[in-house]
Amino acid sequence: MIGEFFAQGNVLTPAFLPVPITDPVAIFLVIISLLLVTPLLFERLRLPGIVGLILAGVAIGPYGLGILERDSTIVLLGTVGLLFLMFMAGLETSLDDLKLNARKALTFGLLTFFVPMVLGTAAMLALGYSLLAAVLVASCFASHTLLALPIISKQGIMRTPAVTITLGGTLITNVLALLVLAIVVKAHQGDLTLGFWLTLIPSLSVYTFVTLWGIPRVGRWFFRKFGHDEGAEFTFVIATLFVVSYVAKLIEIEPIIGAFLAGISITPLIPQLSPLMNRIQFIGNTLFVPFFLLSVGMLVNPGILIQDPRSLLVSGVMVTVAIVAKFLPAWWVGKLFRFRLPSTMVIFGLSVAQAASTLAAITVAYNIELVDQLTVNGTIAMILVTCLVSPWVTDRWGNRMKRSPDSGSSAAGSVLPSVPAGAPKARILVPVANPSTEDNLLNLALILAKTSGGTLLPLHILISRNEPISTEAKLQQDALLTTAEAIAHAAVVDVETIRRVDDAIDKGILRVAYERDATLIICGWKGYASYRENFFGNIIDTIAQRAQVPVLITRFVHPIKTTRRVLLAIPDVDGRSAALQQTITLARTLATELKASLEVVLLLSGVPNDTPPAIASLFSDLPIQQLSGRVVSQLLQVLKEDDLLVLNAGTHSRIFKTSVLGEVPEAIAQQNRKISIIILHSPESY
């Protein structure tokens, strides 16, 4: 609709502009060249690359040099980029964080809606607009586009409280602004009837509920069934984005709201540091979102602002009101919740940009003759100015926000084991032998390696006791390690594959761990059979007892990405022990990166009593459930199918008088084969 509006001659193109390029190869060459050169050039000038892409769009567009025409292809790719932008905003939004900051997000959302509505309506009425026209233009001020979101993501402050409440506030104000648009259009057409209200509100409520409730369940089923196919996973995620966005349009809700809800609904299934998330962010930030920025720039016609003197007045008023009306809510929220200045300015920078909803609303209003050409001109000027202000403010203050005390992310601490300052980074050794379990072990290792900026060490050992190695065994070794290397590269993690020939699996793992300076070993565990009665169990015993670094013994019965809750079970022991501290850090890291909830269970050897102060101080932000007596049976009642149970092997061994893994994980694995378990064995446990 927007592309049609600007292509129908409503805004005159200067006659001196050259004929636009029509050859598809040349068009794509021009666009790709701009996507490559422009951000690099502007970043060298210490300006956000986003600004450069918008200005590049102005330069090559029909109102600049006329190199390209804003045809249906540009509109299509720009629309996809806009949906991707909102989708990635949803992916970066944690429902747990939104719940934690619900009051703040609601406060900001209502403020950033009502302040622009009041100021905008008053300003447009003062310019002689009718009441309906003034209200509609004011709704354009109230909505905003998260144009600077890629900057925030790159700076690593996505999950800070200030950004979280901005994302929540964006959802609230955009939905309200689009509702105002629908109401004003119906009122202008004389169709504002009871039937309209009876249709819109229920359909919006049902749509939101079905999206947030249904998508996670469908996605969890799909990932369990087809999680081994990375291409299918990516295609499913993209299909979810466009299905939800299209359904939103069918019920007369702006598709960008659907894209945002799609991201929120599916984000629990996509770990932040996973290869799948990396692919989504790569294709979005590298291709589709830049297309959207170019398409926005191609809408701008700077010359038209001087064709009518009153156009400058309208444009000036709209630009001023848009900036002031977005700054005041950010400032008030910062004061109310005691944010420092960098956090306050980031809220303002994110919320000041006008593009998506504004363009949609003003186009609809112009087509039904509710606003005139001057308003369209002013809207374009407002979009240009706010799209330049937003990334500049966000980039400048986001860098300062990283050093601000109130900007702490909800991300967990460093990967196990903790590495002293100046020491080598984490090196995580993962023996890979079974293609059916390799994905989960590698994904766990990738989370820990990427969190700490460490290196992944996939290892495959061929057993030889002076006999030749078969060609088939060598080919299988190459295939396993090549797959592991590809997964690591997809997640942008340093990787060193290791091919080994040894006389025993356990000896080979221990020798490689020593030779390659590994700081953590991750092993798979069958779990459903006694580890003392099979060869694999004996290997784990040997490795855990002789390793000089912590060992993670893992049993995954479902894809790690489908984990809904991390259940940390700790014994009633000294809370200051290094092994327990490492287990807690592990559980918090996994809960954060898997976007799962974290719950703590205290296993007591005696009768229930008050939680020891040393334990309570470690979980001041979480409730602690106590279990005593028949611990295993009680744990089985607490555990659910999509849980990930985290235990510490050494401390359990001391309590239950068993070796290495302990009685609790073995009993749970035997009695419930649907529970995934991670057991941390630390050399300090004995």
Image (tube, grey):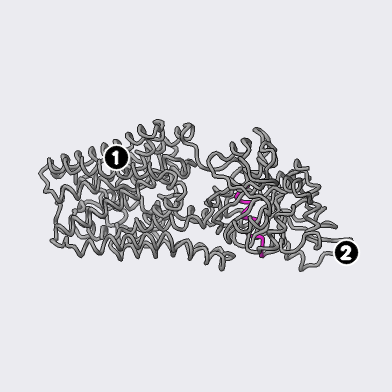
Number of disc labels = 2
Q: Looking at this view, is 229 or 76 the one in front?
A: 229
Q: How far across and how far down the image is residue 89, in percent?
A: 42, 50
Instruction: Please state which of the two labelled residues, at mark 1 or mark 2, is closer to the viewer.
Output: 1
Please give the residue where the numbered disc 1 appears in the rendered image.
326
| Most common SS among magenta residues | helix
Q: Secondary structure at mark 2?
A: loop
Q: Quadrant of the C terminus?
A: top right
Q: How far across and how far down the image is residue 294, in percent?
A: 35, 51
Please give the residue where the numbered disc 2 appears in the rendered image.
467
Q: Amino acid at mark 1?
A: Lys
- Residue 605 belongs to the span the image colors magenta: no
How far apart marks 1 and 2 lie (CA) works out to 75 Å
Q: Looking at this view, is 642 or 573 the one in front?
A: 573
From this viewpoint, is residue 522 visible?
yes
Dot placed on the residue nearer the N-terminal end, 1 or 2: 1
Instruction: Look at the picture and state if 563 lies above or below 224.
Output: above
Q: Residues within 10 Å of mark 2 (few under 14, many from 20)?
A: few
Q: How far across and how far down the image is residue 346, in percent?
A: 39, 38
From this viewpoint, is residue 454 visible?
no
Q: Quadrant of the N terminus?
A: bottom left
Q: Amino acid at mark 2?
A: Glu
Task: Report the magenta residues as a range.
Answer: 436-449
Left or right of 581? Residue 145 is: left
Q: Residues within 10 Å of mark 1 (few under 14, many from 20)?
A: many
Left or right of 127? Residue 640 is: right
Q: How far across and how far down the image is residue 70, in percent?
A: 29, 57
Image disc number at residue 557: none
- Residue 447 belongs to the span the image colors magenta: yes
Q: Secondary structure at mark 1?
A: helix
Instruction: Look at the picture and state if 73 lies above or below 652.
Output: below
Q: Looking at this view, is 112 or 473 the one in front?
A: 112
